[in-house]
């Protein structure tokens, strides 16, 4: 029956169209997550697409000034950057801003900040 192969091809083509993810990101596709770590430490992480890149902002608020924190940033499970931050004298918080390549599919960022025995982990996906 000649119609059966055509129907199968059409069905496969329609399935591919339904499954395919959107290619372009819109400006309102920003992602934001907030959370708490040990000892009441709060974090906020924001990611937004910008011309083929992702702008990432992280704020960790400890309510204690002059603390030194070591941090490591990963993008989709791969090392991206590391550094040391010091909380502000009066604010008790530190911020990290980075840009990354916007890879196809989901971009997941994870920041792990440590100070002595305290560990704070923040995540956001875009």
Image (cartoon, helix red, strand yellow):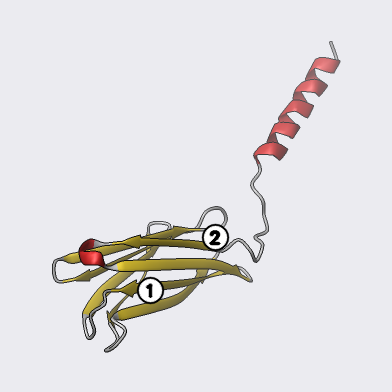
Q: Which mark is residue 103?
A: 2
Residue 15, given in percent of the width and then of the height, sits at 69, 32
Quarter of the rendering containing residue 64: bottom left
Q: Is residue 14 above or below residue 74?
A: above
Residue 45, given in percent of the width and then of the height, sits at 43, 67
Number of numbered discs on residues: 2
- Which residue: 72% across, 29% down? 12
Question: Quick one: 37 or 90, which is closer to the camera?
Answer: 90
- Which residue: 65% across, 66% down? 27
State how far apart marks 2 and 1 are (Cα).
24 Å
Horizontal side, residue 22 vs residue 72: left or right: right
Q: Do residues under tags 2 and 1 come within 8 Å of each other at their CB atoms? A: no
Horizontal side, residue 88 vs residue 126: left or right: left
* Circle 1 residue: 59
Residue 125, given in percent of the width and then of the height, sits at 48, 57
Quarter of the rendering containing residue 69: bottom left
- Which residue: 38% across, 78% down? 95
Horizontal side, residue 84 vs residue 19: left or right: left
Counting residues from the start of the chain, the first of labels 2 and 1 encountered is: 1
Question: Quick one: 71 or 52, which is closer to the camera?
Answer: 71
Q: Element at badge 2?
A: loop
Q: Element at badge 1?
A: strand
Local crowd size for mark 2, using a 10 Å CA cut-off: few (<14), some (14–19), many (≥20) = few
Q: Which mark is residue 97?
A: none
In front of the other: label 2 or label 1? 1
Local crowd size for mark 1, using a 10 Å CA cut-off: few (<14), some (14–19), many (≥20) = some
């Amino acid at each position: 029956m000649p119609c059966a192969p055509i129907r199968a091809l059409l069905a496969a083509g329609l399935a591919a169209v339904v499954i395919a993810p959107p290619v372009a990101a819109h400006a309102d596709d920003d992602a934001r997550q907030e959370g708490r770590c040990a000892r009441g430490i709060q974090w906020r992480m924001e990611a937004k697409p910008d011309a083929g890149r992702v702008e990432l902002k992280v704020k960790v608020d400890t309510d204690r000034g002059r603390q030194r924190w070591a941090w490591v940033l990963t993008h989709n499970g791969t090392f991206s950057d590391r550094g040391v931050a010091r909380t502000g004298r009066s604010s008790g918080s530190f911020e990290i801003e980075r840009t990354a390549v916007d890879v196809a599919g989901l971009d997941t960022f994870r920041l792990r900040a440590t100070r002595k025995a305290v560990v704070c982990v923040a995540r956001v996906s875009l």
